[in-house]
Structures are given as structure tokens and as C-alpha cells.
């Protein structure tokens, strides 16, 4: 509890304060039983209605924000290896390379896997609830050896997610011969950026050895960092 209070956000403090005040109002009423005059009714409206609603709303906002961090994804033990690899400074997997950048960082799981578009946020959160259900109903009973062959992405990873950053229109990106040759396929999604034939899997340790290119092959497929857009 003390640790949480030390690291709590301002919104969390507001929610905590609202809950404490609401509880204090209810305790006051239950102990002293004051007559229901206008003042007491106003207090009760705060204690039973306004403050609990504020607490719930702020809690939802903070809770949804927390689900965007690696710590939340890693709270399921079946994701331990994924998180460890993403934070390994020596790993050349796509997950690790992107996690080392400011844009992705501690939110790399969410930034890569979220749905984009008008309803992207809502659909991502609904999909996350599906993951929670699968974990509680099945995967929480597996150890890593049992879980790893069963853990897989719900649907193929879309190149559209990659193209939120890598537009496929930049000079440097188009300077790579393989990019030019596969441009139509990449934009159509018929060839995956995150495949053994391109930049390698995001989490190669989770794939059979015969499907996973070596670190040398993956590294040779990765363009050098560039100051201009890709």
C-alpha cells in the first residue's frame, strides 16, 4: 500500500481522496443518524452518488492506462519470456529493437499490438478482455513449457501496424531493393514484415527453430537507423 501511494499518479490520489471522503460521510451518517435536512441530503448525495461515481470513473481511466504498460502484460506468467526478450539489450528480435526506442519503450506491447482507426482503442481493450478470459480459464494452469506452444497471436499481425511509423514512402525505406520489389505485397498485407523471410518474427524464441532465422540473418535485414523518415 505504501509503495502504491509513493508511485501513484495525481488522478489516483484524487480517486483515493474521493473514496475516503465518501466513506467518511457514510460512517458519519450511520453513527450519528442526523435528521435528513437539506444539508444532510446534500452530504448524502456526495457520499452515495457524486464521490463514488468520480472514484469509479477515475479508476477506470487509470486502470485502462495501466493496461498499456509492459508490467500489465507481464503479470500473466505465460508472457514472462516475451517481456524478458523485449527488454534484453542484446536481443535482435523486433520486439526488443522497438522496445529500445522512445516511442515504444515500456508500452511496446500495446503500441505494436493495438488496433488503429476510429474504434481501435475500444476494440483493443475488448480484445484484451478476451486475453484475460483465456488466461483465467486455461493458461494460468500451464507452466511455460506447456504454454509456449499454445500461445499465439489471435489473428495475423497486420502490416498496417508497422506502417503507422514506417510509411513505405520515404527515400531511405525505398532505397532497400527488397522493399521496392515487395511494395505492393507489403501494402496489401500478403507478405508480412514480421516473418522469417523479412525482418524475422517479433518473438522468435516462440517459434520452431526451423522457422526462425539466425541473428545474423535478422540483423542483415534490418536497415541502419536513419535521421529521416522511413
Image (cartoon, rainbow, N blue to C red):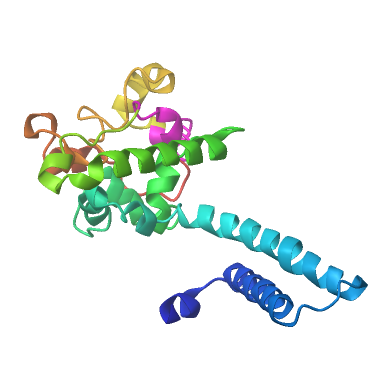
- Answer whether residue 5 is magenta in the image: no
Q: Position of residue 114 (x, y in %)?
A: 46, 39
In the figure, residue 203 lies in which quadrant? top left
Q: Is residue 61 above or below residue 221?
A: below
Depth check: give the residue in front, 147 or 36.
36
* Residues in magenta, as a range: 155-173
Depth check: give the residue in front, 120 or 217.
120
- Answer whether residue 168 is magenta in the image: yes
Q: How many marks?
A: 0
Q: Position of residue 121 (x, y in %)?
A: 55, 40
> Residue 223: in sight, yes or no?
no
Q: Position of residue 25 (x, y in %)?
A: 72, 76
Say which residue appears at 73% left-offset and 69% top-offset.
47
Q: Is residue 15 above or below residue 106?
A: below
Say which residue appears at 15% left-offset and 37% top-offset.
217
Say which residue appears at 44% left-offset and 46% top-offset.
111
Q: Look at the image and tell me in which quarter the N terminus lies.
A: bottom left
Amino acid at each position: 500500500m505504501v509503495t502504491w501511494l509513493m508511485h501513484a499518479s495525481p488522478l489516483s490520489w484524487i480517486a483515493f481522496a474521493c473514496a475516503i471522503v465518501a466513506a467518511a460521510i457514510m460512517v458519519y451518517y450511520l453513527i450519528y443518524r442526523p435528521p435528513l435536512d437539506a444539508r444532510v441530503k446534500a452530504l448524502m448525495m456526495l457520499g452515495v452518488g457524486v464521490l463514488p461515481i468520480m472514484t469509479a470513473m477515475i479508476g477506470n481511466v487509470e486502470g485502462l492506462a495501466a493496461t498499456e504498460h509492459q508490467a500489465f502484460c507481464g503479470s500473466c506468467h505465460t508472457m514472462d519470456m516475451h517481456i524478458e526478450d523485449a527488454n534484453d539489450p542484446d536481443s535482435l528480435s523486433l520486439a526488443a529493437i522497438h522496445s529500445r526506442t522512445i516511442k515504444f519503450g515500456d508500452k511496446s506491447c500495446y503500441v505494436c499490438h493495438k488496433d488503429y482507426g476510429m474504434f481501435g482503442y475500444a476494440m483493443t481493450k475488448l480484445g484484451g478482455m478476451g486475453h484475460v478470459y483465456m488466461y483465467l480459464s486455461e493458461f494460468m494452469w500451464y507452466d511455460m513449457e506447456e504454454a509456449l506452444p499454445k500461445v499465439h497471436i489471435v489473428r495475423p499481425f497486420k502490416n498496417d501496424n508497422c506502417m503507422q511509423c514506417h510509411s513505405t514512402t520515404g527515400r531511405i525505406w525505398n532505397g532497400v531493393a527488397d522493399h521496392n520489389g515487395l511494395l505492393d505485397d507489403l501494402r496489401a498485407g500478403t507478405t508480412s514484415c514480421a516473418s522469417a523471410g523479412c525482418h524475422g518474427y517479433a518473438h522468435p524464441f516462440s517459434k520452431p527453430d526451423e522457422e526462425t532465422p539466425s541473428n545474423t540473418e535478422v540483423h542483415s535485414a534490418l536497415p541502419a537507423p536513419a535521421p529521416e523518415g522511413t
